[in-house]
């Protein structure tokens, strides 16, 4: 597959946008990346079913690099709750491998598109509502965080997101300060991405019809361009998170998510 200049420009723009959001809101950018990668792959002759799967897998692979860049910026400000990372990470790895090695390969791309749309719609609604937790609620014990990590990793693997849309609301619901939750979510994006990418590469080895430049379900041209751009931009988003009205920005972003969710739902229903 020829990597023409217009494709590089499209992927670079996508990388800049998702990298900034990763640092600003503690998300891996998958909510934004998957629909646009699905469109880009579809325009280049990839079947709808395969385009959705490759978009999800490639989106997750970029989070490895975005997470490293973003978490470094947050860590310098002392915002990452490493105690929470240590307790959630084992469950995240287990859940991610179950999702990416088994369920992801078995499900049709159209089913994944519908699940993605519903999940994004739910996430957008949670951002709009911005509910406040009871002041007495705290993070669960080790077993509870292991189970929560498993759910975060599993769902993230099916939608190609870094888990921020689950982990940030979960932590704030347990009265973790929002800036700590965003920073900790960025750190959790790394084990989520690594575990899922292993599964995507392994389960995609025998798949027919993959485009040139594929490594399992991962599309390497997109990974390279988006990863470089997002890695460079993520620290700017992290810096902005400590000075901008994040709650207002979340509501604006939630409006965009509704549009993208509607597109992916249409894609799934008409695939």
Image: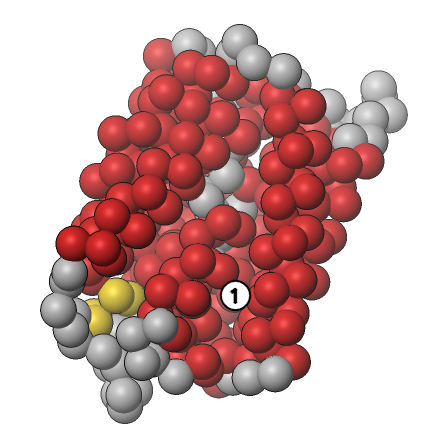
- Residue 23 lies, with reference to residue 31, above or below; the image says above
Q: Is residue 54 above or below residue 178?
A: below
* 225 vs 230: above or below: below
> Disc 1 marks which residue?
158
Residue at left 21%, top 72%? Answer: 214
Residue sitting nearer the eye, 161 or 180: 161
Is residue 99 visible in this depiction of the protein? yes
Please give the name of the residue rendered at 33% of the width and 80% of the height, measured from the top-left corner.
46
- The residue located at (25%, 66%) in the rendering is 219
Q: Is residue 187 visible?
A: no
What is the count of numbered marks?
Answer: 1
Q: Is residue 123 above or below residue 263?
A: above
Is 116 situated left or right of 204 in this image? right
**Dot 1: within a 10 Å radius of its alpha carbon, few (fewer than 14), some, or many (20 or more) residues?**
many
* Residue 85 appears left or right of 139: left
Indicate the position of residue 17 as horizontal and vertical percent values.
Answer: 41, 38
Instruction: Give the left or right position of residue 109, taking residue 141 as reference.
Output: left
Which quadrant is home to the N terminus?
bottom left
Residue 221, located in which quarter of the rendered image? bottom left
Residue 204 in picture, x, y percent from top left: 30, 78
191 to the left or right of 227:
right
In the rendered image, the residue lying farthest to the front is 6
**Element marked by disc 1:** helix
Q: Residue 120: image x %, image y %?
A: 64, 54
Quadrant holding the C terminus? bottom right
Q: Nearer the viewer, residue 205 or 146?
A: 205
């Amino acid at each position: 597959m020829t990597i023409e200049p217009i494709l590089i420009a499209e992927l670079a723009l996508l990388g800049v946008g998702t990298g900034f959001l990763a640092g600003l809101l503690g998300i891996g950018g998958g909510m934004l990346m998957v629909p646009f990668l699905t469109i880009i792959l579809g325009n280049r002759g990839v079947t709808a079913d395969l385009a959705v799967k490759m978009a999800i897998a490639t989106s997750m692979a970029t989070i490895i690099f975005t997470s490293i860049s973003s978490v470094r910026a947050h860590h310098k400000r002392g915002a990452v709750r490493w105690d929470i990372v240590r307790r959630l990470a084992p469950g995240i790895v287990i859940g991610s491998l179950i999702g990416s090695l088994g369920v992801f390969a078995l499900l049709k791309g159209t089913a994944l598109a519908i699940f993605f749309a519903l999940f994004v719609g739910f996430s957008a609604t949670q951002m709009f509502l911005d509910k406040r937790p009871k002041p007495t609620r705290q993070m669960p014990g080790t077993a509870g965080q292991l189970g929560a990590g498993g759910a975060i990793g599993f769902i993230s693997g099916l939608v190609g997101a870094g888990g921020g849309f689950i982990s940030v609301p979960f932590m704030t619901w347990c009265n973790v300060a929002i800036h700590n939750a965003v920073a900790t979510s960025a750190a959790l994006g790394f084990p989520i991405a690594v575990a899922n990418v292993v599964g995507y590469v392994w389960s995609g080895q025998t798949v027919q019809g993959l485009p040139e430049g594929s490594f399992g379900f991962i599309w390497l041209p997109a990974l390279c361009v988006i990863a470089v751009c997002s890695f460079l931009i993520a620290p700017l988003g992290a810096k902005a998170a400590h000075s901008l009205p994040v709650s207002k920005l979340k509501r604006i972003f939630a409006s965009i998510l509704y549009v993208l969710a509607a597109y992916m739902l249409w894609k799934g229903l008409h695939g």
